[in-house]
Amino acid sequence: MSTRPPALRTGILLLLMVVLLAGTGWFGYKSLTAPIAKAGPTCNSQTVAGSLSSSQVTVRVYNAGTQNGLAASIQKQLQGKGFQVPYVGNSSQAIEETTIVGSKIDAPEVKLVAGFFPKSKITEDNRKDHTVDVIVGDSFGGLDETAPTQIAVQQAVICASPSPTATPSATPTPTGTPSTPETPETSG
């Protein structure tokens, strides 16, 4: 049993609870009034000249239909053609025909992607990052496998993937000893 009188225990407990409540309130207030962090860039805009290849184009695919896995299936097909497809998802937008959305209707990256989607509707939204969105629905008839994966351009701005950040190696390299990367042996 405690030797403190009950009134003292109650007072100490009440004081601790008030301090805890005040600390939580202060933290909540600071969190609410702090500026909202801006999302980092989804890509690095780069200018290319001469030709634009599928590997230089970033595409996002959205499924607006009822077929499960349609966007993921198209993602794999586009990646097989060299496109960068970092995102697939569902769209609540109801569409009648496949829709290609890009910065401008005549932008080279939009033309290159649209070549794979015959009879698609092309729209523009003046986006600055030069990604291309593909919204497919139940009427999607498949990719045009014969579409070119490269087109000639005088100059185009593209959405290049952000450069990878350096990550520490899992195995340390002894200091003072140069390390050379191993090259895989090729069989002839």
Image (tube, helix red, strand yellow):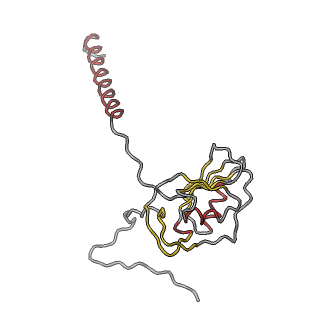
Residue 10, quarter of picture? top left
Residue at point 62%, 46% (across, down): 91
User: Is 6 rendered above or below residue 22?
Assistant: above
Q: Nearer the viewer, residue 110 or 41?
A: 110
In this view of the protein, which residue sits in the foreground, 49 or 140? 49
Q: Please identify the quadrant where the N terminus is shown.
A: top left
The residue drawn where x is 60% and y is 64% is 111
Left or right of 114 on screen, residue 184:
left
- Work out whether 97 lies above or below 83: above
Residue 179: image x %, image y %? 35, 78
Q: Is residue 31 above or below residue 66?
A: above
Image coords of residue 123 (percent x, y): 60, 53
- Viewer-side residue, 2 vs 146: 146
**In which quadrant is the C terminus drawn?**
bottom right
The percent position of residue 99, horizontal first and vertical second, equals: 65, 54
User: In the picture provided, is 119 more to the left or to the right than 7?
Assistant: right
Q: Residue at x 56, y 54 (%)?
A: 124
Which image quadrant for residue 7?
A: top left
From the top left corner, tell me how far across and down residue 106 is, in percent: 57, 62
Of 109 and 31, which appears nearest the observer?
A: 109
Residue visible at 48% across and 67% down in the picture: 156
Q: Does residue 172 lie above or below 122 as drawn?
A: below
Q: Number of marks in the image?
A: 0
